[in-house]
Image: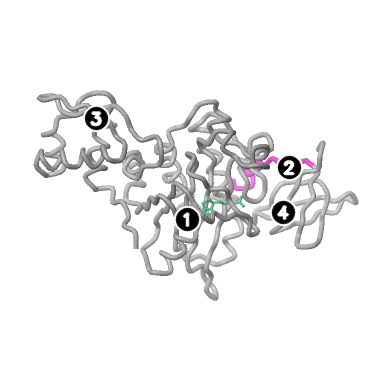
Amino acid sequence: MPAATPSSSPEFVILRELLEHESAFVSGSVLAEKLGVSRVAVWQQMEKLRGQGFVFEAVRSRGYRLVRRPAGLNAALVVAHLGARARSIRLLCLNEVDSTNDEAARLLAAGRPAPFVVLARRQTRGRGRLGRAWHSADNGNLYSSFAFRPRLAPGRMQTFTLWMGVNICELVANFCQVTPGLKWPNDLLFDGRKAGGMLTEARIDADQIRDLVFGLGLNVNSPASAWPGELARRAISLAEQVKEPLDLNRFTAALIGRVLLAYERFVDGDYLENFADLWHRYDVLRGRAVTLLEGEQRHSGTALGVDDEGALIIRDERGRTRRFRAGDVTLEKGS
Ligand code: BTN
């Protein structure tokens, strides 16, 4: 079973100190004291970090200064950036995995205590909704899965992905100053181009959810040229939208904090008070002509938003409204 990164690991403590002091020096003896180890042991930890792509300046009598950090996903950096509330989360950061959702499900089935987060630099079998593949190259994007054991009635799950979507939009808006839209039920978009997708999978006992995996794929730093074929036209990354690269590790830490908080509010149930209003703030379908594919059946009409249970409301041309809990939606051209 892969080991999780505990927030008290020496790398985390050292990095946190150095990040807090930005470009200033931190003395080796201060680090040694914080960790309760010798200065030689601190030096050994610094060597380990150097092996991961960190560059430190070391000056006798002044200590260490962080001058470069790895641009790619780095577990120690993510943990070092986590806010106090999220610091106890167990985090697995893998170079490669078939699917972070599958890995999280396997670990849950093996009895690993939840919550925990699985991150990967690359997936070999990343999955989307309806059995679609999720392109998952090692190109600065985020592949993440959050594992929970919610002990809720299965009926409560209807709004889970939508609620998470709203929270992720708010996080992106705060962190990047650009606001994505939500396309029911699980897409994050900028101007019709897909920046992210969510995949929630639950194992359900008779009257209770046994466990739940919330998967999020977010195009963070991939350049437009990184997309193969059709995707070049249909996908977009946050960096392309913001027009500069993002600090993936800091963003990932902020995301973890936000998802954990959103999960707590979901379990408490108080989110329902303003859920539909929040959804409407980001909803890209509302008021537009859409077609929903439900199995073999097509339903066309105007999207009116979602109800409190997360169902998409569509009014057809005869004025009848219908609610859909599942389906694949396309926007009609020119709507
Ligand atoms: C979709 O748009 O259909 C959902 C895409 C979800 C992709 C993410 S990437 C991390 C996690 N692992 C997976 O295999 N899928 C989800």
The answer to which quarter of the image holds residue 38 is: top left
- Across and down, in percent, residue 47 comes to 21, 39
Q: Which residue is drawn at 51% across and 54% down?
A: 124
CA–CA distance between discs 3 and 2?
A: 51 Å
Secondary structure beneath disc 1?
Answer: helix
Give the camera-side residue of 210 and 60: 60
The answer to whether one can see residue 281 in this image is no
CA–CA distance between discs 1 and 3?
A: 32 Å
CA–CA distance between discs 2 and 1?
A: 32 Å
- Across and down, in percent, residue 107 comes to 41, 64
Question: Which of the two labelled residues, at mark 2 and mark 1, occupies the earlier sequence position?
Answer: 1
Question: Which of the two labelled residues, at mark 1 and mark 3, occupies the earlier sequence position?
Answer: 3
- For the residue marked with disc 4, what is the amino acid? Asp
4 and 2 marks in contact (CB < 8 Å): no
Q: Nearer the viewer, mark 2 or mark 1?
A: 1
- For the residue marked with disc 1, what is the amino acid? Thr
Region rendered in magenta: 273-288
For residue 328, the mark is 4
Q: Residue at x 47, y 63 (%)?
A: 105
Q: Does the residue labelled 1 lie within 8 Å of ligand 1?
A: yes
Give the camera-side residue of 45 and 186: 45
Secondary structure beneath disc 3?
Answer: strand
CA–CA distance between discs 4 and 2?
A: 15 Å
Extreme residue in the right direction:
318
- Across and down, in percent, residue 304 comes to 75, 46
* Residue 279 covered by magenta stretch: yes
Q: Name the residue under label 3.
A: 56
CA–CA distance between discs 4 and 3?
A: 50 Å
1 and 3 marks in contact (CB < 8 Å): no
